Amino acid sequence: MSYYLNSENHLDPGPIYVRENGQLHMVNLALDGVRSSLQKPRPFRLFPKGFSVELCMNREDDTAQKEKTDHFIFTYTREGNLRYSAKSLFSLVLGFISDNVDHIDSLIGFPEQIAEKLFSAAEARQKFTEPGAGLRALQKFTEAYGSLVLCSLCLRNRYLVISEKLEEIKSFRELTCLDLSCCKLGDEHELLEHLTNEALSSVTQLHLKDNCLSDAGVRKMTAPVRVMKRGLENLTLLDLSCNPEITDAGIGYLFSFRKLNCLDISGTGLKDIKAVKHKLQTHIGLVHSKVPLKEFDHSNCKTEGWADQIVLQWERVTSEAVKPRETGEPRTAAQHFYGKRARTEAPVKCPLADTHVNSSEKLQFYKEKAPDCHGPLLKHEAVSSQESKKSKKRAFEEPEKEQSNSSQSSKQKYVCLAVEDWDLLNSY
Protein backbone atom coordinates (compact mmCIF):
# COMPACT_ATOMS: atom_id res chain seq x y z
CA MET A 1 0.00 0.00 0.00
CA SER A 2 2.82 2.39 0.81
CA TYR A 3 4.56 1.52 -2.45
CA TYR A 4 1.41 2.34 -4.36
CA LEU A 5 0.98 5.70 -2.61
CA ASN A 6 4.62 6.75 -2.94
CA SER A 7 5.04 5.76 -6.58
CA GLU A 8 5.41 8.54 -9.12
CA ASN A 9 3.25 7.09 -11.85
CA HIS A 10 0.31 6.09 -9.71
CA LEU A 11 -3.33 6.37 -10.57
CA ASP A 12 -5.90 8.14 -8.46
CA PRO A 13 -7.63 5.41 -6.50
CA GLY A 14 -10.59 7.64 -5.73
CA PRO A 15 -12.17 8.12 -2.32
CA ILE A 16 -11.66 5.44 0.36
CA TYR A 17 -14.47 4.73 2.84
CA VAL A 18 -14.25 2.98 6.21
CA ARG A 19 -17.20 1.69 8.28
CA GLU A 20 -16.90 2.34 12.03
CA ASN A 21 -19.64 1.55 14.50
CA GLY A 22 -22.14 1.09 11.71
CA GLN A 23 -21.35 4.46 10.04
CA LEU A 24 -19.45 5.09 6.80
CA HIS A 25 -16.53 7.55 6.91
CA MET A 26 -14.22 8.82 4.16
CA VAL A 27 -10.45 8.54 4.76
CA ASN A 28 -8.16 11.43 3.73
CA LEU A 29 -4.90 10.43 1.99
CA ALA A 30 -1.57 12.30 2.18
CA LEU A 31 0.45 12.25 -1.03
CA ASP A 32 4.06 13.54 -0.88
CA GLY A 33 3.38 15.48 2.28
CA VAL A 34 0.49 17.47 0.77
CA ARG A 35 -2.98 16.91 2.20
CA SER A 36 -5.60 16.89 -0.49
CA SER A 37 -9.22 16.47 0.34
CA LEU A 38 -10.99 14.25 -2.12
CA GLN A 39 -14.30 15.69 -3.24
CA LYS A 40 -17.20 13.99 -4.84
CA PRO A 41 -16.41 12.13 -8.05
CA ARG A 42 -16.71 14.27 -11.17
CA PRO A 43 -18.86 13.07 -14.07
CA PHE A 44 -17.11 11.55 -17.03
CA ARG A 45 -16.80 13.97 -20.06
CA LEU A 46 -17.26 12.57 -23.53
CA PHE A 47 -16.12 15.84 -25.23
CA PRO A 48 -13.57 18.47 -24.14
CA LYS A 49 -14.58 21.39 -21.99
CA GLY A 50 -14.73 24.02 -24.80
CA PHE A 51 -16.82 21.87 -27.14
CA SER A 52 -20.24 23.21 -28.17
CA VAL A 53 -22.85 22.26 -30.74
CA GLU A 54 -24.97 24.73 -32.73
CA LEU A 55 -27.71 23.90 -35.23
CA CYS A 56 -27.39 26.13 -38.34
CA MET A 57 -30.27 25.99 -40.84
CA ASN A 58 -30.78 28.49 -43.70
CA ARG A 59 -28.60 31.17 -42.18
CA GLU A 60 -27.67 33.86 -44.72
CA ASP A 61 -25.23 35.86 -42.57
CA ASP A 62 -23.17 32.97 -41.23
CA THR A 63 -19.91 34.89 -41.04
CA ALA A 64 -18.39 32.58 -38.40
CA GLN A 65 -18.87 29.52 -40.57
CA LYS A 66 -17.53 31.38 -43.59
CA GLU A 67 -14.38 32.39 -41.75
CA LYS A 68 -13.76 28.76 -40.77
CA THR A 69 -14.18 27.34 -44.28
CA ASP A 70 -12.83 30.28 -46.26
CA HIS A 71 -9.26 29.11 -45.82
CA PHE A 72 -9.85 25.72 -47.42
CA ILE A 73 -10.78 24.38 -50.85
CA PHE A 74 -13.15 21.38 -50.69
CA THR A 75 -13.17 18.87 -53.53
CA TYR A 76 -14.48 15.34 -54.08
CA THR A 77 -12.41 12.41 -55.30
CA ARG A 78 -13.54 9.81 -57.80
CA GLU A 79 -14.47 7.49 -54.97
CA GLY A 80 -16.76 10.18 -53.50
CA ASN A 81 -14.54 11.10 -50.57
CA LEU A 82 -14.36 14.72 -49.44
CA ARG A 83 -10.88 16.17 -49.65
CA TYR A 84 -9.78 19.63 -48.61
CA SER A 85 -6.63 21.59 -49.25
CA ALA A 86 -5.44 24.87 -47.74
CA LYS A 87 -5.53 28.02 -49.87
CA SER A 88 -2.36 29.89 -50.68
CA LEU A 89 -1.26 32.81 -48.57
CA PHE A 90 -1.64 35.14 -51.56
CA SER A 91 -5.31 34.24 -52.06
CA LEU A 92 -6.02 34.65 -48.34
CA VAL A 93 -4.39 38.08 -48.24
CA LEU A 94 -6.15 39.08 -51.47
CA GLY A 95 -9.52 38.12 -50.03
CA PHE A 96 -8.88 40.03 -46.81
CA ILE A 97 -7.79 43.20 -48.63
CA SER A 98 -10.76 43.02 -51.03
CA ASP A 99 -13.14 42.83 -48.06
CA ASN A 100 -11.57 46.02 -46.65
CA VAL A 101 -10.61 47.75 -49.91
CA ASP A 102 -12.43 50.95 -48.94
CA HIS A 103 -10.00 51.46 -46.02
CA ILE A 104 -6.88 51.52 -48.23
CA ASP A 105 -5.07 54.85 -48.21
CA SER A 106 -3.89 54.81 -51.84
CA LEU A 107 -3.04 52.42 -54.69
CA ILE A 108 -0.73 54.78 -56.57
CA GLY A 109 2.44 52.93 -57.55
CA PHE A 110 0.91 49.51 -56.88
CA PRO A 111 1.54 46.90 -59.66
CA GLU A 112 -1.21 46.78 -62.26
CA GLN A 113 -1.33 42.97 -62.42
CA ILE A 114 -2.01 42.64 -58.70
CA ALA A 115 -4.44 45.57 -58.77
CA GLU A 116 -6.50 43.89 -61.48
CA LYS A 117 -6.78 40.73 -59.38
CA LEU A 118 -7.72 42.82 -56.35
CA PHE A 119 -10.39 44.62 -58.40
CA SER A 120 -11.82 41.31 -59.63
CA ALA A 121 -11.93 39.94 -56.08
CA ALA A 122 -13.73 43.05 -54.82
CA GLU A 123 -16.16 42.88 -57.74
CA ALA A 124 -16.94 39.22 -57.00
CA ARG A 125 -17.80 40.23 -53.44
CA GLN A 126 -19.98 43.10 -54.83
CA LYS A 127 -18.11 45.70 -52.81
CA PHE A 128 -18.80 48.41 -55.41
CA THR A 129 -22.57 48.14 -54.97
CA GLU A 130 -22.47 49.08 -51.29
CA PRO A 131 -23.81 52.61 -50.64
CA GLY A 132 -20.82 54.20 -48.90
CA ALA A 133 -17.90 51.82 -49.20
CA GLY A 134 -18.43 51.23 -52.93
CA LEU A 135 -17.76 54.85 -53.88
CA ARG A 136 -14.62 55.06 -51.74
CA ALA A 137 -13.28 51.79 -53.13
CA LEU A 138 -13.95 52.84 -56.72
CA GLN A 139 -12.20 56.16 -56.22
CA LYS A 140 -9.06 54.37 -55.00
CA PHE A 141 -8.82 52.47 -58.29
CA THR A 142 -9.76 55.33 -60.62
CA GLU A 143 -7.26 57.71 -59.04
CA ALA A 144 -4.42 55.23 -59.48
CA TYR A 145 -5.17 53.57 -62.83
CA GLY A 146 -7.59 55.79 -64.76
CA SER A 147 -8.35 54.33 -68.18
CA LEU A 148 -7.40 50.79 -67.11
CA VAL A 149 -10.44 50.72 -64.84
CA LEU A 150 -12.76 51.97 -67.61
CA CYS A 151 -12.02 53.49 -71.00
CA SER A 152 -15.44 53.24 -72.68
CA LEU A 153 -18.74 53.71 -70.84
CA CYS A 154 -22.16 53.00 -72.38
CA LEU A 155 -25.16 54.33 -70.39
CA ARG A 156 -27.67 54.34 -73.23
CA ASN A 157 -31.25 54.41 -71.92
CA ARG A 158 -30.03 53.83 -68.34
CA TYR A 159 -31.41 56.94 -66.69
CA LEU A 160 -32.17 54.97 -63.49
CA VAL A 161 -28.53 53.99 -63.12
CA ILE A 162 -27.45 57.59 -63.69
CA SER A 163 -29.82 58.91 -61.04
CA GLU A 164 -28.84 56.27 -58.45
CA LYS A 165 -25.08 56.00 -59.14
CA LEU A 166 -24.24 59.54 -60.25
CA GLU A 167 -21.29 60.00 -57.89
CA GLU A 168 -19.79 56.66 -58.91
CA ILE A 169 -20.11 57.57 -62.59
CA LYS A 170 -18.45 60.92 -61.98
CA SER A 171 -15.48 59.18 -60.37
CA PHE A 172 -14.38 57.57 -63.68
CA ARG A 173 -11.41 59.31 -65.25
CA GLU A 174 -9.66 59.22 -68.62
CA LEU A 175 -12.67 57.95 -70.56
CA THR A 176 -12.33 57.92 -74.33
CA CYS A 177 -15.90 57.01 -75.35
CA LEU A 178 -19.08 58.02 -73.50
CA ASP A 179 -22.59 57.13 -74.66
CA LEU A 180 -25.44 59.00 -72.90
CA SER A 181 -28.09 58.52 -75.57
CA CYS A 182 -31.78 58.58 -74.57
CA CYS A 183 -31.16 59.52 -70.92
CA LYS A 184 -33.26 62.74 -70.88
CA LEU A 185 -30.57 64.74 -69.11
CA GLY A 186 -31.65 68.22 -70.11
CA ASP A 187 -29.61 71.42 -69.87
CA GLU A 188 -29.31 71.56 -66.06
CA HIS A 189 -28.19 68.03 -65.20
CA GLU A 190 -25.07 67.53 -63.07
CA LEU A 191 -23.63 64.99 -65.47
CA LEU A 192 -23.75 67.49 -68.34
CA GLU A 193 -21.81 69.93 -66.17
CA HIS A 194 -19.35 67.16 -65.31
CA LEU A 195 -18.53 66.79 -69.02
CA THR A 196 -16.67 70.11 -68.85
CA ASN A 197 -14.37 68.82 -66.10
CA GLU A 198 -10.69 68.23 -66.77
CA ALA A 199 -11.11 64.58 -65.75
CA LEU A 200 -13.02 64.00 -69.03
CA SER A 201 -10.65 65.91 -71.29
CA SER A 202 -9.62 62.59 -72.84
CA VAL A 203 -13.10 61.91 -74.29
CA THR A 204 -12.96 61.58 -78.07
CA GLN A 205 -16.44 60.15 -78.78
CA LEU A 206 -19.55 61.62 -77.16
CA HIS A 207 -23.12 60.47 -77.87
CA LEU A 208 -25.90 62.78 -76.63
CA LYS A 209 -28.79 61.60 -78.77
CA ASP A 210 -32.30 62.43 -77.49
CA ASN A 211 -31.36 64.21 -74.25
CA CYS A 212 -33.71 67.21 -74.42
CA LEU A 213 -30.79 69.54 -75.09
CA SER A 214 -31.16 73.10 -76.31
CA ASP A 215 -28.81 75.90 -77.29
CA ALA A 216 -28.19 76.66 -73.60
CA GLY A 217 -26.95 73.13 -72.97
CA VAL A 218 -24.60 73.23 -75.97
CA ARG A 219 -23.28 76.61 -74.82
CA LYS A 220 -22.60 75.27 -71.31
CA MET A 221 -20.88 72.19 -72.71
CA THR A 222 -18.57 74.18 -74.99
CA ALA A 223 -17.82 77.08 -72.59
CA PRO A 224 -14.51 75.69 -71.20
CA VAL A 225 -13.22 74.97 -74.70
CA ARG A 226 -14.19 78.40 -76.02
CA VAL A 227 -12.94 80.41 -73.05
CA MET A 228 -10.13 78.47 -71.33
CA LYS A 229 -9.13 76.03 -74.09
CA ARG A 230 -9.76 72.95 -71.89
CA GLY A 231 -12.50 70.41 -71.41
CA LEU A 232 -13.69 68.48 -74.48
CA GLU A 233 -10.93 69.85 -76.68
CA ASN A 234 -9.96 66.37 -77.95
CA LEU A 235 -13.47 65.54 -79.15
CA THR A 236 -13.50 63.92 -82.61
CA LEU A 237 -17.04 62.47 -82.78
CA LEU A 238 -20.22 64.15 -81.55
CA ASP A 239 -23.82 62.93 -81.83
CA LEU A 240 -26.50 65.56 -81.10
CA SER A 241 -29.32 63.98 -83.10
CA CYS A 242 -32.98 63.96 -81.99
CA ASN A 243 -32.66 67.18 -79.95
CA PRO A 244 -35.23 69.47 -81.60
CA GLU A 245 -34.47 72.43 -79.31
CA ILE A 246 -31.00 72.89 -80.84
CA THR A 247 -31.16 75.64 -83.47
CA ASP A 248 -28.72 77.42 -85.78
CA ALA A 249 -27.37 79.47 -82.87
CA GLY A 250 -26.42 76.33 -80.93
CA ILE A 251 -24.51 74.91 -83.89
CA GLY A 252 -22.30 77.99 -83.83
CA TYR A 253 -20.86 76.93 -80.46
CA LEU A 254 -19.47 73.75 -82.03
CA PHE A 255 -16.88 75.67 -84.01
CA SER A 256 -14.56 75.51 -80.98
CA PHE A 257 -14.09 71.75 -81.49
CA ARG A 258 -11.19 71.97 -83.92
CA LYS A 259 -10.45 68.23 -83.84
CA LEU A 260 -14.02 67.24 -84.73
CA ASN A 261 -14.16 64.70 -87.56
CA CYS A 262 -17.76 63.45 -87.41
CA LEU A 263 -20.93 65.30 -86.43
CA ASP A 264 -24.54 64.12 -86.44
CA ILE A 265 -27.20 66.86 -86.08
CA SER A 266 -30.13 65.08 -87.72
CA GLY A 267 -33.47 65.62 -86.00
CA THR A 268 -32.56 69.05 -84.64
CA GLY A 269 -34.41 72.35 -85.10
CA LEU A 270 -32.20 73.76 -87.86
CA LYS A 271 -33.82 76.19 -90.29
CA ASP A 272 -31.10 77.50 -92.57
CA ILE A 273 -29.38 74.22 -93.41
CA LYS A 274 -27.31 75.65 -96.25
CA ALA A 275 -25.77 78.27 -94.00
CA VAL A 276 -24.95 75.64 -91.39
CA LYS A 277 -23.27 73.47 -94.01
CA HIS A 278 -21.18 76.39 -95.24
CA LYS A 279 -20.11 77.39 -91.71
CA LEU A 280 -19.13 73.88 -90.70
CA GLN A 281 -17.15 73.44 -93.90
CA THR A 282 -15.29 76.74 -93.59
CA HIS A 283 -14.58 76.68 -89.82
CA ILE A 284 -13.93 72.99 -89.12
CA GLY A 285 -13.68 71.47 -92.59
CA LEU A 286 -16.67 69.12 -92.22
CA VAL A 287 -18.34 67.93 -95.43
CA HIS A 288 -22.05 67.03 -95.54
CA SER A 289 -22.89 63.35 -96.02
CA LYS A 290 -26.29 61.71 -96.54
CA VAL A 291 -24.87 58.22 -96.08
CA PRO A 292 -24.98 56.88 -92.50
CA LEU A 293 -21.48 56.83 -91.08
CA LYS A 294 -20.09 53.74 -89.39
CA GLU A 295 -18.78 55.86 -86.55
CA PHE A 296 -22.35 56.61 -85.46
CA ASP A 297 -23.27 52.95 -85.08
CA HIS A 298 -24.20 52.77 -81.40
CA SER A 299 -23.37 49.08 -81.23
CA ASN A 300 -19.68 50.02 -81.44
CA CYS A 301 -19.86 51.88 -78.13
CA LYS A 302 -19.58 49.32 -75.32
CA THR A 303 -18.42 49.34 -71.74
CA GLU A 304 -14.77 48.24 -71.74
CA GLY A 305 -12.30 47.96 -68.87
CA TRP A 306 -12.02 46.34 -65.48
CA ALA A 307 -15.38 47.81 -64.47
CA ASP A 308 -17.37 46.41 -67.40
CA GLN A 309 -19.45 44.24 -65.05
CA ILE A 310 -20.00 46.92 -62.41
CA VAL A 311 -22.54 48.77 -64.57
CA LEU A 312 -24.52 45.54 -64.97
CA GLN A 313 -24.49 45.05 -61.18
CA TRP A 314 -25.75 48.62 -60.69
CA GLU A 315 -28.49 48.08 -63.25
CA ARG A 316 -29.60 44.85 -61.60
CA VAL A 317 -29.71 46.45 -58.15
CA THR A 318 -31.72 49.47 -59.36
CA SER A 319 -34.11 47.32 -61.39
CA GLU A 320 -34.80 45.09 -58.38
CA ALA A 321 -35.45 48.16 -56.22
CA VAL A 322 -37.97 49.60 -58.69
CA LYS A 323 -39.46 46.24 -59.71
CA PRO A 324 -43.25 46.17 -59.15
CA ARG A 325 -44.61 43.64 -56.72
CA GLU A 326 -47.52 42.45 -58.84
CA THR A 327 -46.82 40.96 -62.23
CA GLY A 328 -49.16 40.03 -65.04
CA GLU A 329 -47.94 36.43 -65.42
CA PRO A 330 -51.10 34.76 -64.01
CA ARG A 331 -53.29 36.96 -66.19
CA THR A 332 -51.35 36.20 -69.37
CA ALA A 333 -51.32 32.47 -68.53
CA ALA A 334 -55.10 32.51 -68.07
CA GLN A 335 -55.57 34.37 -71.35
CA HIS A 336 -53.40 31.81 -73.13
CA PHE A 337 -55.43 28.98 -71.59
CA TYR A 338 -58.82 30.35 -72.63
CA GLY A 339 -57.59 31.34 -76.08
CA LYS A 340 -57.91 35.07 -75.58
CA ARG A 341 -55.38 37.62 -76.73
CA ALA A 342 -52.64 38.06 -74.17
CA ARG A 343 -51.87 41.48 -72.81
CA THR A 344 -48.40 42.49 -74.00
CA GLU A 345 -46.49 44.74 -71.66
CA ALA A 346 -43.43 46.00 -73.44
CA PRO A 347 -40.62 47.46 -71.31
CA VAL A 348 -40.32 51.22 -71.21
CA LYS A 349 -37.78 52.30 -73.80
CA CYS A 350 -36.76 55.49 -75.42
CA PRO A 351 -39.06 56.10 -78.41
CA LEU A 352 -36.25 57.65 -80.44
CA ALA A 353 -33.62 55.08 -79.55
CA ASP A 354 -34.38 52.69 -82.39
CA THR A 355 -35.94 55.02 -84.94
CA HIS A 356 -34.19 55.39 -88.24
CA VAL A 357 -34.32 58.79 -89.88
CA ASN A 358 -34.59 58.86 -93.64
CA SER A 359 -31.40 59.43 -95.57
CA SER A 360 -32.73 62.73 -96.90
CA GLU A 361 -33.23 64.04 -93.36
CA LYS A 362 -29.86 62.93 -92.02
CA LEU A 363 -27.42 65.74 -91.36
CA GLN A 364 -24.13 63.99 -90.84
CA PHE A 365 -20.80 65.67 -91.46
CA TYR A 366 -17.32 64.24 -91.67
CA LYS A 367 -13.84 65.21 -92.73
CA GLU A 368 -12.49 63.79 -95.94
CA LYS A 369 -9.33 61.74 -95.53
CA ALA A 370 -6.19 62.54 -97.48
CA PRO A 371 -5.99 60.73 -100.86
CA ASP A 372 -3.87 57.60 -100.84
CA CYS A 373 -1.25 56.80 -103.45
CA HIS A 374 -2.71 53.33 -103.87
CA GLY A 375 -6.16 54.66 -104.76
CA PRO A 376 -6.58 53.16 -108.27
CA LEU A 377 -5.52 49.71 -107.11
CA LEU A 378 -7.97 49.81 -104.25
CA LYS A 379 -10.78 50.90 -106.59
CA HIS A 380 -10.03 48.03 -108.93
CA GLU A 381 -10.05 45.60 -106.02
CA ALA A 382 -13.32 47.04 -104.76
CA VAL A 383 -14.95 46.61 -108.19
CA SER A 384 -13.77 43.02 -108.44
CA SER A 385 -15.00 42.28 -104.90
CA GLN A 386 -18.41 43.76 -105.73
CA GLU A 387 -18.68 41.60 -108.86
CA SER A 388 -17.80 38.48 -106.85
CA LYS A 389 -20.40 39.40 -104.22
CA LYS A 390 -23.06 39.84 -106.94
CA SER A 391 -22.25 36.42 -108.42
CA LYS A 392 -22.47 34.85 -104.95
CA LYS A 393 -25.83 36.56 -104.36
CA ARG A 394 -27.17 35.14 -107.63
CA ALA A 395 -25.96 31.68 -106.68
CA PHE A 396 -27.67 31.94 -103.29
CA GLU A 397 -30.92 33.42 -104.65
CA GLU A 398 -31.68 30.44 -106.91
CA PRO A 399 -31.77 27.76 -104.17
CA GLU A 400 -33.71 30.17 -101.94
CA LYS A 401 -36.38 30.54 -104.62
CA GLU A 402 -36.60 26.78 -105.00
CA GLN A 403 -36.95 26.37 -101.23
CA SER A 404 -39.68 29.02 -101.11
CA ASN A 405 -41.60 27.32 -103.93
CA SER A 406 -41.29 23.94 -102.22
CA SER A 407 -42.41 25.44 -98.89
CA GLN A 408 -45.46 27.03 -100.58
CA SER A 409 -46.39 23.75 -102.21
CA SER A 410 -46.00 21.91 -98.87
CA LYS A 411 -48.21 24.52 -97.18
CA GLN A 412 -50.86 24.02 -99.86
CA LYS A 413 -50.75 20.25 -99.24
CA TYR A 414 -51.37 20.73 -95.55
CA VAL A 415 -54.06 23.38 -96.04
CA CYS A 416 -56.19 21.27 -98.42
CA LEU A 417 -58.64 19.51 -96.06
CA ALA A 418 -61.60 17.34 -96.88
CA VAL A 419 -65.20 18.14 -95.93
CA GLU A 420 -65.18 15.46 -93.26
CA ASP A 421 -62.11 17.05 -91.68
CA TRP A 422 -63.81 20.46 -91.56
CA ASP A 423 -66.91 18.92 -89.96
CA LEU A 424 -64.68 17.27 -87.36
CA LEU A 425 -62.91 20.54 -86.57
CA ASN A 426 -66.22 22.42 -86.31
CA SER A 427 -67.55 19.86 -83.85
CA TYR A 428 -64.97 21.02 -81.28
Image: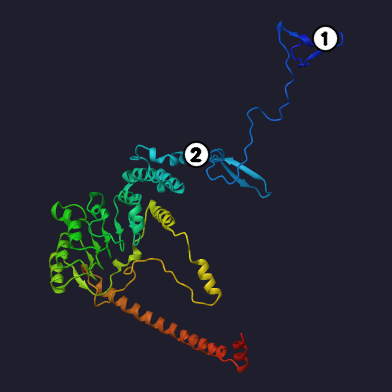
Q: At numbered mark 2, what does the secondary structure look like: helix, strand or loop?
A: helix
- Residue 247: name its quadrant: bottom left
**x and y, in percent, of residue 21 in the image:** 87, 8
**Proximity of marks 1 and 2: CB atoms separated by less than 8 Å:** no
Q: Earlier in the sequence, mark 1 or mark 2?
A: 1
Q: Is residue 125 above or below residue 155?
A: above
Name the foreground residue: 168 vs 27. Answer: 27
Name the foreground residue: 82 vs 109. Answer: 82
In this view, the residue farthest toward the bottom is: 419
Instruction: Provide the residue designation for mark 1.
Output: 1
Query: Counting other residues with Cα less than 10 Å from the Cα at mark 2, is it few (<14), some (14-19), or many (20 or more)?
Result: some
Q: Is residue 213 above or below residue 41?
A: below
Residue at left offset 37%, top offset 53% = 305
Q: Amino acid at mark 1?
A: Met
- Residue 203: name its quadrant: bottom left
Q: Amino acid at mark 2?
A: Leu
Q: At numbered mark 1, what does the secondary structure look like: helix, strand or loop?
A: loop
**x and y, in percent, of residue 389 in the image:** 38, 79
Residue at left offset 43%, top offset 84% = 397
Instruction: Provide the residue designation for mark 2.
Output: 92
